[in-house]
Amino acid sequence: MVHTIIDTANHIAAYAAKAARVKVVAAYPITPQTTVVEKIAEFVESGEMDAEYIRVESEHSAMAACVGAEAAGVRTFTATSAHGLALMHEVLHWAAGSRLPIVMSVINRAMGAPWSIWPDFSDSLSQRDTGWIQFYCSDNQEVFDTIIQAYKVCEDKRVLLPAMVCSEGFILSHTFMPVIVPEQEEIDDFLPPYDPGWILDIENPLSHANLVSPEWYMEFRYMIQQAMENAKNLIVEVDREYGRRFGFEHGGLIEKYQCEDADLILVTMGTMGSEAKISVNNLRKEDLKVGLARVRVFRPFPKEEIRKLAENTQMLTTIDRHVSFGFEGFLATEVKASLYSREKGMADPPLVAGFLAGLGGRDVTYRDIEEIAKKSWKWMEEGKVKEEIVWWNLRE
Amino acid sequence: MEKLEVKIPKSRKDLPITPLSIPVIGSIGKTGDWRTFKPVIDYSKCTRCLWCWIYCPEGVITREEDDTPRIDYEYCKGCGICAEVCPLKAIEMVREK
Amino acid sequence: MVSLKELPKEEYLLKGNAACAGCGAAISLRLLFKALGNKVILIVPACCTTVIQGPYPYTSVKVPLLNIVFEATGAAASGVVAALKKRGIDDVTVVGWAGDGGTADIGIQALSGAAERGTNFIYICYDNEAYGNTGMQRSGATPFGAWTTTTPTGKREHKKDVPMIMAAHGIPYVATAIPSYPMDLIRKLRKAKEMRGTKYIHILSPCPTGWRYPGSKTIEIGKLAVETGLWALYEIENGVFKLSPPSARLLDKEKRKPVELYLKAQGRFRHLTDEDIAEIQRWVDAAWEKYKKLQSN
C-alpha cells in the first residue's frame, strides 16, 4: 500500500525523516534548506512526529547536538546547505570518527565568497574526505527513498558511518514533484529501530574518543575505510530490496542508462544526470551511441563500477558541478584515478574528458549536455581530448 | 543494545569500532614516581577530621572504617596539600631518597 | 547540611591520572562526584580534563564521558539531554564540564544557545583563568595583569564576568564556587541537580602550573581569593542574588583582606606595579558595590 504526495524535495526530506522515526532533530536554517526544518517543526509541534527538535544556534552546534544525541542512543537527522555545511566541517570529521550513523540532508548550494544562493556541488564535494557516505539525488522520489535507505545502510553494524543525502537547491528543493510514499508499517518493517554500535551507558562507564597515540590511530582510520568498502555492496543490496518492496530503485551506486552498447558515456551527478537521459535519447535518434552513468554515490567512490563501464566504451565524459581550484572537477579526477593503469602492458583505458557546468546555479539543459556529448564525440573520433578542462557556457 | 564488551587491545581485532576507554586506576602509570616529598601522617595527632581526604586532588587518601586516613603511596604525587590543610599539622612532607 | 563524614567514599576520578600535582580542577571533579554520585554523563570539550583522562585505552573517569570538540559542550549536551528524554531516562544528570576557554571564549555560543533553550543540564566551568590544555595562553577569563604565554607582560583587560552573563539569560540557577570551600560547592551541585532547566556553576580553579605557585598552596590560594573578595561566592536562584556564607561576611570592606596578599602569592602576578595592584583593588571594590546592591534587593 502506498500513497502519493506532491511536494517539494525539501518537504519530502522532512516526510522521510518523519517516516524514518527520527527521534532528535537539531538544525539551523539556511537558504535553500529552510523549508526542510520548517516542515519538521510543523510535524513535531502538531504531534505528527515524535521527536525532540533542538532549534540550535548554529550549524556547528547542530552537528554537535546530533553527535550527542546519537551517542546517547537515538536516531537523529539534520539538514543544511553551503556555509552551514562548511561550518560543521570539524564536527563532520568527529561524527565519522565516532562511527555515528547520522543522516543529513544537504541542499546543495554554491559556496561564497561571493554570496550565491543557487545550486552547485561546491558545498558537499568539499566534504568528501570526512568519512561521510555521500548520495546525490536526481529527483524528489529519490530524496525520499534515499533518506530511508541511508539509515538502513548507515546503521548496519558493518558500516556505522554517517551519510549526507544531497539534492540541488531550487532545482529540487523548491520544485513540486509527485512522490510515492510507502505506508508507515511497511517502512517500519524495512527500517527497524536504531540499535547503536556503542552508547553512553551508566552501567558501563567508558570515555569516548580520548587521546589515541600513533600506536592505534591508524587502525581506527583503517576501520572507517573498511566500513566504506562494506557500504558499497550494502548500498546496492538495500536499493534493490527497497525496489522489490516499494517499486523504486535508483541504480545502487551508479544509475546506468543505455550504457551497454555506448561508445561514449556521460558521467555526472544529481539533476544533470536526469537531464542527460533526454540528451541520450535525442543523440541516439541521431545514431550516436551515447550512454549515461549517473554517479549516485560519490563516497564510497564506485571505482569498480567505473572500471566495468570503461571496459566496453571508447570514452567517458564527466560533467562536474564544482571544481577543485588548482586542479579540475571531482568526477574527472576520480574517474581517471579509477582507470589508471595498475599493471604494465594493460590495454589503454578509454579517453576521459572533463567538463565543468552549472557552477553557481547556471542552468544546464539537455541541449547543453547534447552539445557536450557531441564535442566529446569529435575528440573521440580524433583520438585526442583537445582541452583538458572545458568550462561550459563561460561568458566572454 | 546489550552491554558493550571493551578490552585492552593487543591486536587490531581487539579494537572497538571507535575509541572507547576503560576506567582504570593509574591511567597514566604509577604517579607515585612523580614526587620528591611524601606526606607522612602522625596518627597520634590525627583526629580523623577528614580534611586531608576531601582536599586530596588525587583521591589517594582512603578512609578506613573509623575514618582513619591511609595514603596510597603508589599514586600520591606529593603535592603537599594534605600537609597544608591539616588543622592539627599532623602531616609532614618528608623528602624521599 | 551534610558533614564530611557523610560524604560517599567511592571515587569516580581515579587516582594515577595525568592531572598536575595540586590541580584545583581535579579536586573540583572529585567533589562533583561526591555531590552527585555516578549517575552522571559528562560532556567534556578540549580542556585540561581531556588530558587528565589519560590516553586510550585507559581513562581515569569512571562515569560515561563524551569528549567533544572545543566549541560544542552546550550543543552536545543539548543532544544528549534530548536523547535521554526520548528514551524515557530521567534519573541521569547530564553535566557539561568545561574549562574557561571552552566556556568564556570559543564555547560561549553553544553555552548561550543551550541556556536560552532552557536545556535541562548542569554546566560547570572550572576556571584556571587561561587555556591550560595548550600551555597557559590567555583567555577571556584571565584576570587583569596576569602573565600568560600570550600576555607575557600582563593582560590589559579585566576578567570576563561569565556568571553574570549567564544570569542575564534568566536561567533558574547560577552559582560561583571554589574547591577551597568544598561543602559550599557540594551544596550548590546538589541544589542544581534537583532543579529543572539550565544550571550554571562557575568554579575558580587554582592552577599551580599556570598561576606559578607551589602545588601545596592550592587550597590556601583559593581561600585568599575569597577572603580578598576577588572571588565572590554567590548564588542567583530564579533571579535572586545571595552571597554565600564565606563571602557574605565580606560586604563590609574592612573585613576583606587586601588583594595584594592574593596577588603576591602567585608568580603570574610577580611583575605587577603598585598601580596595577591599585587597579585590581579598585575593580574588586567596584564589584562589591554591585554585590551590595544586588544583595539588598
Image (tube, coloured by chain):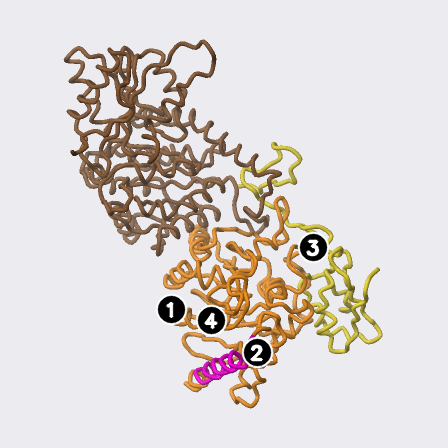
Chain colours: A brown, B yellow, C orange
What chain is tagged by disc 4?
C
Disc 4 crowd, CA 10 A, few/some/many (<14, 14-19, 20+): few
The mark lying in front, picked from 4 and 3, is 4
Q: How many marks?
A: 4
Mark before the other along the chain sequence, 1 or 2: 1
Where's residue A162, x and y in %? 42, 38
Subunit of label 2: C
Q: Is residue A295 above or below residue A56?
A: above
- Residue matched to label 3: C16
- Along the polypeptide, which appears first: circle 3 or circle 1? 3
Cα–Cα gap, marks 2 and 4: 23 Å
Quadrant where the image shows the C terminus of chain A: top left
Residue depicted at 45% across the width and 64% down the height: C104
Q: Residue C169 shows which numbered tag? A: 1
- The residue indicated by pointer 2 is C226
Q: Front-most of A244 and C201?
A: C201
In the image, the segment drawn in magenta is C272-291
Q: Secondary structure at mark 2?
A: helix
